[in-house]
Amino acid sequence: MATNPEIERRRTFAIVAHPDAGKTSLTEKFLLFGGQIQVAGAVKSNKIKKTATSDWMDIEKQRGISVTTSVMEFDYKDYKVNILDTPGHQDFAEDTYRTLTAVDSVIIVVDGAKGVETQTRKLMEVCRMRNTPVIIFVNKMDREAKDPFDLMDELEEELVIQVRPLTWPIESGPRFKGVYNLYEHNLNLFQPSKQVVTEKVEVDITTEELDNRIGHDLADKLRGELELIEGVYPEFNVDEYLKGETAPVFFGSALNNFGVEELLNTFVEIAPSPRPVKAEERTVMPDEAKFTGFIFKITANIDPNHRSCIAFCKVCSGKFSRNVPYYHVRHDKTMRFSSPTQFMAQRKTTVDEAWAGDIIGLPDNGTFKIGDTLTEGEHLHFRGLPSFSPEMFKYIENADPMKQKQLAKGIDQLMDEGVAQLFVNQFNGRKIIGTVGQLQFEVIQYRLEHEYNAKCRWEPVSLYKACWIEGDDLAELEAFKKRKYQYMAKDREGRDVFLADSNYVLQMAQMDFKHIKFHFTSEF
Ligand code: G4P
């Protein structure tokens, strides 16, 4: 896609999964292949959340949950791999969705025994919205797993995408023998080990050698299954993968570093280099000479000694250079950055330049908002990042009358960071915070207290969904707002939001006001 070799060699992606499926373990193995850590298992599977990924907030340390997003980068073969880590907790799903707007492709990890879980389904929905190319890794094959053909059907149905196995497992659990690579036509025999990458053996499956390796019965079974696969699934087509229509599927065990090398090798080969990015004005190509980028994430307290934020910027085109003035479109002013950083887990180093596809950290003290665009002077606005209707709502009230200003500023900045969503009820003027999970409320309260010296109190409000409303018939829109005046709110951009207190009420509203569109994401 890109003609500049520096950009062409970049692979910027995220590994996503339902919690516990094995995202951390797989990330660790990738880091091992990338030479970023020396011994697998040195970072204990769960510990990686505390050591190799972001560990910036006290609350996170206390709870041992990876709350924030970080970036890990390494060279592998001729490629520069950028992994965007995503929070390991469901309550921060919104963060993950936002991170997905900054990646060019995704690897989804699925637990072989559990199959597709809720969070996987949601993440896939976000990928589909942007036609993000997806590779699926079915993990934990060393444990008793579902039948692989059933799994294929489940993936296809639940994730609404065509699938194409590129490796195929020989049994699972204690009987797990390994995987057969359908493309290289070799066999990778399983031996449980966190340290050793197993040798692959070239086996002509039509010969007795296969029987000698895995036994006669399994050899016969494998031959039958491979025949079936070739009959059922069309030839793997890279273009269909790149369009987000087909997902290649790999099997393995991240914990045992098994099947991971094949995954990584295929990934770097077929995954897209930085893709064109849509701005409101035009589509920006990655190899354009001039730098453009957008902020997709803001994180506080990376350095606990300074109350500073880091704004994560995805370079969309050209080359970013340190100390060069760039144009901050929303503020209509020029800024230069003397200490942009790149990341390897907690280590961050100052960078002099970064190319399209890279993620850079820009020190921030309130100048950035999620979605802000930087350019070399062009008035560009990268498309709004979607906000999803929150799942939980609470009124936020001031608990310390002396700190009204601090509270307002804190709420404002935390919302700029995208920690949660703020709606102002037009009827009573009260502020409502919407989140994906309970933990976010706790983070907000904690951060308001520790960073802004403000105290808040939560009060219950019973709401089901926030819907952005839109309609061509202004009279109907006005009639709706009048009828629902107690439930009308504005989001931070001043858009009309209907706060439905139950599914029933929402359905009735949809029936009564047929020409009004009710959107569950802010991107429409
Ligand atoms: P996550 O980031 O997606 O939440 O998952 P993570 O990698 O932390 O893995 C969740 C649990 O599943 C961990 O066990 C991990 O060891 C285990 N696991 C990951 N991959 C495999 C695999 O291929 N085979 C098997 N059998 N287990 C796997 P834990 O008990 O929570 O942690 P730990 O005690 O192992 O550190």
Image: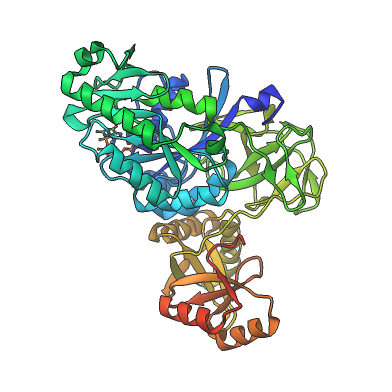
Q: Residue furthest right?
A: 377
Residue 212's place in the image compared with 310, above or below, is: above
Point 56% across, 46% down: residue = 131
- On screen, residue 366 versus residue 455, left or right, reads right
Q: Is residue 213 above or below residue 95?
A: above
Q: Nearer the viewer, residue 341 or 519?
A: 519
* Figure quadrant of the C terminus: bottom right
In this picture, residue 428 sits left or right of residue 37: right
Q: How many marks?
A: 0
Q: Quadrant of ligand 1?
A: top left
Q: Quadrant of the N terminus?
A: top right
Residue 259 visible in rendering:
yes
Viewer-proximal residue among 307 and 379: 379
Q: Which of the 4 image quadrants contains residue 407? A: bottom right
Q: Is residue 218 left or right of residue 332?
A: left
Task: Look at the image and tell me whether residue 120 can be seen.
Answer: no
Residue 140, given in percent of the width and then of the height, sits at 28, 34
Q: Position of residue 509 (x, y in %)?
A: 51, 81
The image quadrant of residue 392 is bottom left
Give the quadrant of residue 475: bottom right
Rendering coords of residue 349 (x, y %): 59, 28
What color scheme is it? rainbow
Name, please, the residue furthest toward the front: 231
Left or right: residue 296 versus residue 59 is right
Q: Position of residue 86 (x, y in %)?
A: 46, 43
Q: Nearer the viewer, residue 56 or 377?
A: 377
- Tell me the residue at 77%/42% (across/down): 375
